[in-house]
Image (cartoon, helix red, strand yellow):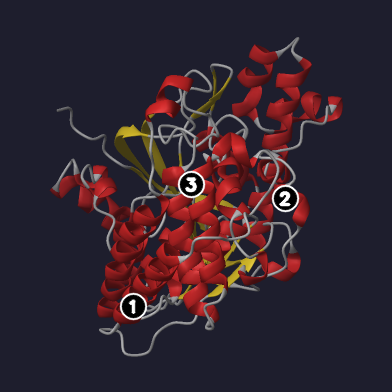
Amino acid sequence: MSSAPQPDVGSEDPLADAIAARTLANPQFWNFASSIRTRSAGHGFFQYPAMMVPELQGALLDDLQATEPWVRSIYDPFMGSGTVLLESMFRGLEFHGTDINPLAVLLTQVKSSPPPGAEAKAAVESVYVIAKRIREVESHDFLHRDKWFNPKVTHDLSKLRAVISDVTALPMRQFLWICLAETVRRVSNSRMSTFKLHAYDSDTLKSRQPDALQTFHTVGIGNSRRAAAHWRRMSALGAVPNPTLLRASVFDQFGAPRSVDAVMTSPPYGDNHTTVPYGQHSYLPLQWMEVDDIPGTFESRLLQTPASLDTASLGGSRSYRRDLIESLPNEIASTKHIFESLAGSASLEAKAASFIHDYRESLKAVSERLKLGGVSFFTLGERRIKGIELPLVAMTREILEAIGHAHVATVTRQILGKKMAGRNSSGSTMVSEQVLVMRKKP
């Protein structure tokens, strides 16, 4: 096994020294090779795309607290599955998180305050028993439902949906919706080997006989144990932090905190349609939920098609902007080779320009919310657009340095088979990701 690369660190910064000390003591420290398969507590409620490694983010927060004990608040503008949320809460830190994906907001709401384990287990058992007894139920319908679910699965999911809808307490319903979301993921006709919606081949569909009721029971009991583990860990804190979780874009002023001590996040890796299709992955689970139980306002347009949510996300626009295609390579030097390589393909140039422009503007928006002297941690993966590498780490550093941030450290983590979007483009499997640590100059 090859040694992990030494972290690229700044000078005369205690945080940089603490990060470097980790690697010097154990060159493989940042890899956390076995952690992906052992997500503890609420980290395992639902299989969300491209989840960060909790232990890695936790170690960075530990280093931050050890060297800057005055840090109290963390902001994640792309909170996704809530990895940073939980690791912040476990350390008694205030947390403010936003995401445009309704499923992400519901998931983080449940993770932040799941029902007690025993109550969760009892609710799961009750839903399971009642659903098994039901013979007739109004079949829940939505566009292209029959493509993604066989008739028996549709019938059983409709029963589960009806029973969950009758649960009185909203927090318990929300927990049960997340259990149903993971059930939907496992019993649909979409292959689990990719986060995109790709149906199994006809022979596989004929041989598959998923049991939605039993799957829900298995998922629910497992999530009940995770809820119990969450509260065991939180009990050591005494006062439980009350996080702010909002369905909002990074550009929504009402959704952003005024001033935070640190930013910790993992922005989208390039073109959402072909890299990490969070929207596609969330489309089917969201179809089975009562949308009124999802925190925040719900926009029906986000579920018009499987691609609607990704189109609304960072860099999702396909509009052609000649001004951006001409100006961005001169303004962000690290992007020049992208536009040179894509020259002549209007659609690919537009993809690159849309993402890079949106990404730069998002970094500016995030920076405005960070206190002077505050630290930001960006977990990044180098991705591709039609085989052309998008230099996300270099691009992020260049943009942040241009708006008054200094480099603290860059840590590289080797990845063994981290799943991204599946078979949608070359370079679909990442082999490494980096955490870029920057500090906003006083």
**Looking at the rendering, in which quadrant would you find the C terminus?**
bottom right
Which residue occupies the extreme top position in the image?
344
Vertical placement of residue 31 versus 84, above or below = above
Comparing 390 with 86, the one in front is: 86
As measured in the structure, the alpha-carbon distance from the residue carrying label 2 to the one carrying label 3 is 24 Å
Q: Which mark is residue 122?
A: 1
Residue depth check, mark 1 versus mark 2: number of the one nearer the observer: 1
Which residue occupies the extreme bottom position in the image?
238
**Looking at the rendering, in which quadrant would you find the N terminus?**
top left
Residue at point 77%, 31% (across, down): 318
- Tell whether label 3 touches label 2 (CB within 8 Å): no
Q: Check disc 3 and report the residue beneath it.
A: 153
Mark found first going from the N terminus, 1 or 3: 1
Query: Residue 82 location in percent, x, y?
Result: 46, 61
Q: Check disc 2 and report the residue beneath it.
A: 302
As measured in the structure, the alpha-carbon distance from the residue carrying label 1 to the one carrying label 2 is 33 Å
Mark found first going from the N terminus, 2 or 3: 3
Residue at point 57%, 71% (across, down): 165
Comparing 209 with 219, the one in front is: 209
Query: Residue 341 location in percent, x, y?
Result: 64, 13
Residue at point 29%, 55% (across, down): 39
Q: Which mark is residue 69?
A: none
Comparing 79 with 105, the one in front is: 105
Residue at point 50%, 78% (across, down): 171
Q: Amino acid type of disc 2? A: Leu
As measured in the structure, the alpha-carbon distance from the residue carrying label 1 to the one carrying label 3 is 23 Å
